[in-house]
Image (tube, helix red, strand yellow):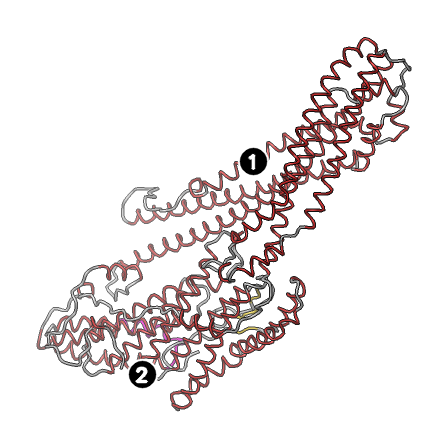
Amino acid sequence: MATNNLLNVPLRHTSLIDLGQELSLAITEKFFQPPSLFDKDLNYLTTLRNEIQTISNSKGAELHSSSSSSSSSSSSSSSSLTQLESHLNKLFTYFASLESISKKFPQDSVLFSWTPTIYKQNSTPINVALFKFEQLNVIFQIACVYSIMGWAQSRHSDEGLKKSCQYFQLAAGAFNFLNEQVQRVTAMNLKDRPFEPQEDWDNNTILCLVYLMLAQAQEAIWQKAIHGETTKDSIIARLAVQTSELYADALNYSQTSRYINLEWQNHITVKKYHFLAAAHLRTSNVALDNFQYGEQVAHLRVAQDAVKVAVKHKKYVNSFVIEDLTGLQEIVDAKLRVAEKDNDLIYLKIVPPENELKHIAGALMVKPISPSEKFQLGKTQAPVLFDELLPYVIIHYAQALRERQDDYVRGKIFEPIQGLNHMMTKFLNEKNLPASIDALEQPENIPDSIVHHSRDIMDHGGVNSIENELLNLSGLRKECLHLIQECQLRVDMDRQEDLLLRQGHEKEQEQEQEQEQEQKPGDLSHYQRQTTDVAARVLIEKIHKMREYLDLAVHGDIQVEQKFNSIKDTLAVLMGGYASLHKFIPNSNYVKLDKNVANVVAELRTALNDWDSIESSRSQFLQDVEIKNRDNNILPKLIQEYKQRKEDALYDNQGQFQTNAFELVYESHLKMLDLDISYIQQTKLEQQQLESRIDTINTQFIQLYTSTVNSTQQKRQMAMQQLDSAYVMYTEIKVNLNEGLKFYHDFITRGNNVLRDAEEYLRNRRMESRELEMEMKLKMTKKRQQVGNNNLQIPVRGQKDTATSREQPKLVSPRGQKSNVWDPNSGIKFG
């Protein structure tokens, strides 16, 4: 992976994809335009993607070989670097093209496949159908190419070191940009993530690569500095210790990553201690110049110990790195022997321990450089693609608005009309109409209203339909209960695991206190972790609300079932046809009606006929609205609005489609229904007037009817009233069942979201507990190692931060200022 003393990140491999063909299929399936209109763009993308695949696979290997031979031939080096620049430009152009087509096509139009190349485990291809996934891999490839370019530069010239430093910082910037994009995805809730980032893009792995690139960039500056004959030792020491610290950062992240291999970890470890030793070697020279012979020996001893640690990790490390380390070791050993001998025989100065030596403040000269200009250049170089293709997001949004329009029509027109009809049916049933007058006018025939009710019930499945829906509700109810139980299980698992972790920590505390002869069992004062009740407070509240809602739903289901059981037998009569109805409704004796009664009955019949007319006109109205709603598609209006706007104005800074850009179009589109909605109020007022009129007439009828009705008529009326009431209750049950089904489906959707939140919570808590366990074990290990440990104090991450936070005096050479000597405050200037 390296043929000099640095590392480069190898390119990922990718499978060959006919991108143009895949997009052509997407156009055929999901767009209203023929793919032949875009043959030029499709062919261009196929060629460009094939070039990216060739760069990532076959030419990736060739780059390593060509770059490794660059040290023997300047023309070969120039050629390979020119080739790398060409590949880099193609990657930036492809990235810009992906950004362009992702605004036109569905995100999952093409399945992309990429294989990691640097990790411990046997890598298998990762397949994701998402343009964003392809873009992130292209960013990774860009960072890799920059790392190869930095790695391939000459290490023997100032110009080569300058370019190497620049390219490694650009590689760090690209890796850092990749990490920002990935972290933005992982910060989302599980249900909102467009995809699940692959595990080898975790924060620790990518940050290891960022700091590795920065360390190698800093090393280039250090190497340039040691080539300068007049550069002070104190300056070189500061550059070296900063290089060591950057390698230490890379090492820390690699050790917490599951994907950085042992070869790389050992390489970074050797580099960390190599530059720590180099810094103390240079500082020993400063001490010698200042006649601080005891400090000189102390720094050389620290350098020698650091070299010994580096040597312990030389397994699998590149021979060039080991050669550099061996050379450093020989110099340190030789200088230490002379210094110790001189101090023992001549100077007799006290050699201070390492922790009393003056801190060497690092001189950070590098930072991640974002290749933003290159990304912008890629946009200008990429051709305009699919300019005449309507973006799929517009089509998809039109479909979403179509659903909203259907919901609007249903909620504003259909449901209010159906509600008014049901109110009138219930009103008439409460007035025993039309059963009371049918019993008088039709002593033997079955009234048309009852026949209509019978047919309606049979058309909708009758008793069997309700029983099946009740059974369906029962299954959904069990599924909802299972969801609640699964959510609660996650919380209970965390509570149990937290308890076990606390008990384990308590035992470790007791063991530690026993060793220290202190009896303070159960001291958890520094156990910084929230209890489950605190950490899962929001989740527990959601589960509690879910239980409450489900309890209310169960109570409602019981009431619906009781209502159904109360009319089940009567519904069977209505479903039995004419024979069943004739048998159920007794005939009555014909009685000639009194003139006054006959007039009132006629008025009632007229009013009921008026209601039939209103109901019929409403039915026709709903049919007309349904046709109007179906024929008025909003898509043409959205297309017109899209053409009037610039495409970039439709997306925010994050590349997300701004739906509010079309809200005014949607609101204007719905105005076509304003007259239809006004009809609702008009027909409602008409119904109220009719109800008042029927109520008045029916009151007169009741007064006359009670004095003239005979027993057979009364029995017939009661039978028909029972049938009418059963029908009204049947329609109510159907509405209740539909509402119940909608409730349970919504509950399951929302419950699954809560379950995903619970799973994410449990996963995060488990990660947190593993980190706490590792931290506790590390603390215990350090405490044991501190006992009688007089060896080299290897700085760890936390110690470094503490040390650098202390204000230290700057190391300034006692010699007079010379011209052409680099000053740390002025920065490194190449050429």
Label 1 element class: helix
Left or right? Give the position of 191 relative to 311: right
Instruction: State which quadrant residue 449 falls in.
Output: top right
Return the disc, 1 or 2, that comes first in the chain's sequence.
2
CA gap, disc 1 and disc 2: 70 Å
Q: Nearer the viewer, mark 1 or mark 2?
A: 2
- Which percent across, then down, holds residue 570? 80, 26
The front one of 399 and 347 is 399
Q: Is residue 534 magenta?
A: no
Label 2 crowding class (10 Å Cα cut-off): few <14, some 14-19, many 20+? some
Q: Main secondary structure of the magenta part?
A: helix
Q: Give the residue at mark 2.
A: 159
- Quadrant containing the C terminus in the rendered view: bottom left
- State the extent of the magenta-drawn residues as a range: 305-319
The reply to whether discs 1 and 2 touch (Cβ–Cβ < 8 Å) is no
Residue 37 is situated, as x and y percent measured from the top left of the image, at 64, 71
Q: Amino acid at mark 2?
A: Glu
SS for dot 2: helix
Q: Nearer the viewer, residue 501 or 564?
A: 564
**Image height check: is 67 above or below 784?**
below
Res 547 label: 1
In this view of the protein, which residue sits in the foreground, 534 or 229? 229
Q: Position of residue 638 (x, y in %)?
A: 59, 56
Pick whichever, 152 or 399, lies toward us.
399
Q: Find out whether residue 312 is within the magenta segment.
A: yes
